C-alpha cells in the first residue's frame, strides 16, 4: 500500500497543539510514558502466548533505548505484541475515550496556569506527550502473529500523520523521536544525553519487570515493589509505581501493603488515589487490580479481586498458588480468589477507618472524592454494612462539616430513639424543606443526604448501633409531648374530607401535621412507599411502575389553612375552594423540589388569584 496522509481526529489535534506548545515544567515524563506503553506491549505478548496459544518467542522480552547525539534522536524499542495498521489509527490517530472534552479543558487550564502535565496519563493519551520534546515522531510496528510487512507512522504534530507499509519489520514497536533543540529555560533538556536517560529511567521506571537496556547495560532493577519490605522502599518509588499502574499523575492518598503466609500465600500492594478519576461512574471504565502469579503478570483489571464499590482502589496482587493460565471464568469461582477479595476489602475499609482518627484531613479528602461510590457497598454487600457505615460521613443540620453516624448518635437528644434523615438534590433544598420545620424548632439533628445512591441504601440498612434510620418525610411524625398542644383533628374533619375528595387523583390521604411550624402544607410518603425521587430514578431507567399517591399534611396553625377551614364552613360549594386546594397541593409539591404535572395551569390559577388581591 502506498503512503497515505490522514488527519488527526479534532480532539487529538487540540491535544497535539497543547503538547507542541507546552509550557509544562516536567517534560521528563514523556520517556516514562513510552516505557510504560512498551511494558504493556510485552505483557500482552506474554499473555497472548500463555492464554491464547499465540506462537511467539518470549525468551527475551525487553525494552531498548538508543540515543544518537549527532542526529538528535531518541529511540524506544520493544519486542512486544505490536500493532496492526488499523490499531495504529485507532490508538494514535483518534482519542476514542470518554471524557475527552473534560480532558482538553483541564489540560488547557493547567497549561495556562503553568501547571504540570498531571492529567495526561490519567486519560490514557501519554503517547502525545512525545511532542513536548520532539518536532517529529516516527513509529514502526508489526503485530505478533501476522505475516509480511508492518506499519510506519510519522507526524510532526501539526494536525496530520502519514501511514505506509514497512517491509521486513520485526515483531514489536519502535518509536523514534527527532528531538527539539535544548532549551533549559523552558525545562527542555538534552534527552539524547546518557546521564539524563539513566536518571529518568531510575526515577520513573526502575520497577518495570522487563529489562530496560541501553547498549549492554540494564538500567532498571526490575525488583517487584510489593515483594520488598516497606522500610526498604521510598515514598517516591511507591508513587512512581502507582502512576505506572493507574495512569494518574498525582500521588496516592494512601499506600497499603499486605502479605499472607501459610496455606495460601499472596502479597498485595494497594493504593487509594487522592482524587476520583473522570470515569468513576461510567460503566465502561477500567477497574480492578493487576494479578500476578509468582511475579508473572497474568491479568490486568481483575474485577474479581475487589468489589465494584471499591473500584477506585489500584494495585497489584501476587498469588503464589494459582495456575499461570487461570482465566476470568475460573477466577469468579476460585475460593482462594474469594478469600483474597474478602481480606483486601477488610484491609481497605480498616485503613480508611484508621485515617478518620490518624489523619482527618486525608479522610475528608477520601470521602469527598469516593464517598458516593463507597455507599454503593451498602446495597451490594450486606455483610459489610457495619464497617462501611463506620467510615461514612453525611451532611447534617448540626454543623457545616459532614458527621459520622457514631458522632450523630453521641449527640442524640435524651429519649430520641431514631436517626433522622432527609434526602434531596442539594443541601439548601433539604435544609429549607417544610419537613425540617418542627425538627429545627425543637433542636433535633437531621442528616442531609444528597447523593442519588442515598435514596436507595437507606431502605437497605435497618439500623446503626441499634438506632433505626428514619426519614422525616415518610410516615407520621409527632414530636409534641404535650397533648394539649395538639390541634383536635375533629374541628378540621370536614375540610380534610373536602380536600381528599378534590385531590383524590393526587393524594391518598389528607391529615393534620405535627411536623410543620411555618409552612401551610407538605407532602409525605407512607412509611413503606418509595419516595418520589426513587420513583423518578426508576422511570429514568425505563422501569415504569404505578404512580404512588402521597399524603397531604396541613399545618392547622397556618393562616391559610385556618382561612380555608372558615371558607369551607361558610360555603362548601364556593367555586374558589377547589382552585385553592389545587394551589395548596402545588405549593407543597414545589416546596420539596417536585415537578408539577401541569405547570401552565398552576401558573394561571396563581396569577388569577393574585390579580384578585391587588
Image: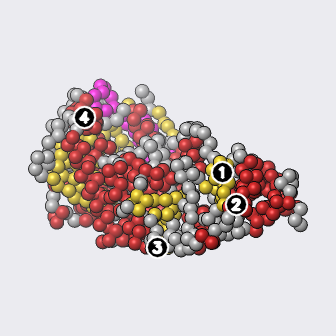
Compare marks 2 and 1 and give the one earlier in the sequence: 2
Residue, disc 1: 509
Answer with the quarter of the image where residue 30 lies: bottom left
How many marks overall? 4
Task: Indicate the secondary structure of the residue bearing disc 3.
Answer: loop
For the question of whether residue 77 can be seen, the reply is no
Q: Marks 3 and 2, how far apart in space?
A: 32 Å
**Is label 2 or label 1 in front?**
2
Which contiguous range is marked in magenta? 142-164
Q: Marks 1 and 4, how far apart in space?
A: 55 Å
**Is label 3 or label 1 in front?**
1
Q: Marks 2 and 1, how far apart in space?
A: 15 Å
Compare marks 1 and 4 and give the one earlier in the sequence: 4
The residue sitting at 40% across, 72% down in the picture is 410
Compare marks 3 and 1 and give the one earlier in the sequence: 3
For the residue pair 206 and 249, the one nearer the viewer reads as 249
**Mark on residue 330?**
4
Compare marks 4 and 2 and give the one earlier in the sequence: 4
Q: Marks 4 and 2, how far apart in space?
A: 68 Å
The picture places residue 555, in percent across and down from the top left corner, at: 68, 64
The picture places residue 423, in percent across and down from the top left corner, at: 54, 58
Task: Indicate the secondary structure of the residue bearing disc 2.
Answer: helix
The picture places residue 185, in percent across and down from the top left corner, at: 40, 68
**Mark on residue 490?**
2
Q: Is residue 584 left or right of residue 109?
A: right
- Quick one: label 4, few (<14), some, or many (20+) residues within 10 Å? few
The residue sitting at 45% across, 59% down in the picture is 469
Residue, disc 3: 413
Amino acid at each position: 500500500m502506498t503512503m497515505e496522509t490522514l488527519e488527526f481526529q479534532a480532539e487529538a489535534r487540540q491535544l497535539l497543539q497543547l503538547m507542541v506548545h507546552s509550557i509544562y515544567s516536567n517534560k521528563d515524563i514523556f520517556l516514562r510514558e513510552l516505557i510504560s506503553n512498551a511494558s504493556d506491549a510485552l505483557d500482552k505478548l506474554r499473555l497472548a502466548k500463555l492464554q491464547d496459544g499465540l506462537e511467539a518467542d518470549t525468551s527475551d522480552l525487553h525494552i531498548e533505548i538508543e540515543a544518537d547525539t549527532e542526529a538528535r534522536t531518541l529511540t524506544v524499542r520493544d519486542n512486544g505484541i505490536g500493532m496492526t495498521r488499523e490499531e495504529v489509527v485507532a490508538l494514535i490517530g483518534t482519542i476514542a475515550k470518554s471524557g475527552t472534552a473534560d480532558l482538553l479543558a483541564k489540560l488547557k487550564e493547567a497549561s495556562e496556569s503553568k501547571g504540570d502535565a498531571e492529567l495526561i496519563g490519567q486519560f490514557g493519551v501519554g503517547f502525545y506527550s512525545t511532542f513536548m520534546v520532539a518536532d517529529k515522531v516516527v513509529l514502526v510496528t508489526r503485530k505478533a502473529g501476522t505475516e509480511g510487512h508492518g506499519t510506519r507512522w510519522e507526524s510532526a504534530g501539526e494536525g496530520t500523520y502519514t501511514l505506509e507499509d514497512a517491509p521486513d519489520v520485526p515483531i514489536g514497536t519502535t518509536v523514534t523521536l527527532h528531538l527539539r533543540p535544548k532549551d533549559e529555560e523552558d525545562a527542555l533538556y538534552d534527552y539524547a544525553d546518557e546521564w539524563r536517560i539513566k536518571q529518568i529511567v531510575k526515577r520513573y521506571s526502575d520497577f518495570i519487570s522487563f529489562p530496560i537496556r541501553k547498549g549492554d547495560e540494564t538500567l532498571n532493577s526490575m525488583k517487584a515493589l510489593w515483594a520488598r519490605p516497606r522500610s526498604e522502599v521510598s515514598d517516591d518509588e511507591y508513587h512512581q509505581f502507582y502512576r505506572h499502574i493507574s495512569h494518574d499523575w498525582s500521588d496516592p492518598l494512601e499506600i497499603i501493603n499486605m502479605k499472607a503466609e501459610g496455606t495460601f500465600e499472596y502479597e498485595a500492594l494497594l493504593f487509594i488515589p487522592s482524587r476520583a478519576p473522570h470515569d468513576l461512574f461510567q460503566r465502561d471504565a477500567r477497574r480492578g487490580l493487576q494479578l500476578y502469579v509468582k511475579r508473572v503478570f497474568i491479568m490486568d483489571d481483575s474485577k474479581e479481586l475487589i468489589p465494584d464499590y471499591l473500584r477506585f482502589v489500584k494495585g497489584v496482587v501476587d498469588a503464589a498458588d494459582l495456575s499461570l493460565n487461570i482465566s476470568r471464568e475460573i477466577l469468579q469461582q476460585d475460593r482462594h480468589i474469594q478469600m483474597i477479595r474478602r481480606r483486601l476489602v477488610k484491609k481497605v475499609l480498616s485503613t480508611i477507618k484508621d485515617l478518620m482518627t490518624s489523619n482527618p484531613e486525608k479522610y475528608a479528602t477520601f470521602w469527598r472524592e469516593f464517598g458516593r461510590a463507597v455507599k454503593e457497598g451498602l446495597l451490594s454487600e450486606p455483610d459489610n454494612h457495619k464497617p462501611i457505615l463506620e467510615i461514612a460521613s453525611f451532611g447534617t443540620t448540626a454543623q457545616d462539616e459532614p458527621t459520622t453516624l457514631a458522632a450523630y448518635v453521641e449527640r442524640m437528644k435524651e429519649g430520641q430513639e431514631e436517626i433522622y434523615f432527609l434526602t434531596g438534590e442539594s443541601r439548601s433544598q433539604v435544609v429549607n424543606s417544610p419537613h425540617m420545620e418542627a425538627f429545627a424548632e425543637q433542636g433535633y439533628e437531621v442528616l442531609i443526604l444528597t447523593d442519588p445512591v442515598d435514596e436507595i441504601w437507606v431502605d437497605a440498612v435497618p439500623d446503626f448501633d441499634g438506632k433505626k434510620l428514619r426519614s422525616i418525610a415518610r410516615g407520621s411524625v409527632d414530636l409534641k409531648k404535650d397533648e394539649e398542644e395538639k390541634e383536635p383533628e375533629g374541628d378540621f374533619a370536614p375540610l380534610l374530607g373536602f380536600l381528599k375528595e378534590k385531590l383524590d387523583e393526587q393524594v391518598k390521604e389528607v391529615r393534620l401535621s405535627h411536623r410543620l411550624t411555618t409552612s401551610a402544607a407538605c407532602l409525605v410518603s407512607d412509611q413503606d412507599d418509595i419516595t418520589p425521587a426513587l420513583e423518578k430514578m426508576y422511570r429514568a431507567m425505563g422501569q415504569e411502575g404505578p404512580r404512588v399517591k402521597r399524603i397531604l399534611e396541613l399545618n392547622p396553625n397556618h393562616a391559610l389553612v385556618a382561612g380555608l377551614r372558615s371558607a369551607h364552613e361558610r360555603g362548601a360549594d364556593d367555586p374558589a375552594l377547589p382552585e385553592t386546594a389545587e394551589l395548596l397541593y402545588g405549593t407543597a409539591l414545589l416546596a420539596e423540589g417536585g415537578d408539577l404535572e401541569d405547570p401552565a395551569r398552576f401558573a394561571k390559577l396563581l396569577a388569577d388569584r393574585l390579580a384578585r388581591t391587588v
